[in-house]
Amino acid sequence: MIKPGITTREIAEQWPESDKVWSDILIKYEDQTAGSNWMHGIGLTLYELPLAWREVSLEHPLPIEKGMTFAIETQLGTIGSGAARIEEMVHVVDDGVEVLTRWPIGEITEVY
């Protein structure tokens, strides 16, 4: 759904409310999930704008433009079993994104 002309609000709205996803580990507020469901620009510093995160983007959206490059970060796992932090690198093109990540997300290696 990421493409030129949308905003970071539209992206952040795709992530579920944090207290609904992680209530079993006592998460009550969006700010407790920094880095768990978000997108940040890639450049010369660690985290650059625009940032898509429910805590800020719902009220302070920024436009998405062709040529921007992002890291989209989420987590996948089961309480008591394990988890993995998933990070996809994407580049915004005319009609969507080009995925830059080389490791296929659907082929995550489980290590026990």
Image (cartoon, helix red, strand yellow):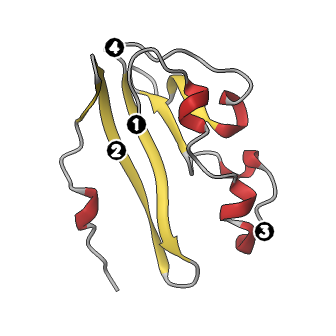
Q: Name the residue under label 2.
A: 88
Q: Tell me which numbered mark, 1 or 4, is placed earlier along the sequence.
A: 4
Disc 4 and disc 2 in contact, CB within 8 angstroms = no
Q: Earlier in the sequence, mark 3 or mark 4?
A: 3
The residue wearing badge 3 is 26
105 to 63, vertically: above or below: below
Query: In the rendered image of this protein, does residue 94 appear above or below residue 100?
Result: above
Disc 3 or disc 4, which is closer to the eye?
Answer: 4
Cα separation between marks 3 and 1: 27 Å
Residue pointed to by mark 1: 71
Quarter containing the N terminus: top left
Question: Residue at 54% of width from left, 21% of height from top?
Answer: 7
Q: Position of residue 52 (x, y in %)?
A: 56, 32
**Mark 1 or mark 4, which is nearer to you?**
4
Give the quadrant of residue 62: top right
Q: Quadrant of residue 96?
A: top left
Give whichever of 53, 1 is nearer the camera.
Answer: 1
Residue 18 or 31: which is nearer the viewer? 18
Q: Name the residue under label 4.
A: 66
* Element carrying mark 3: loop
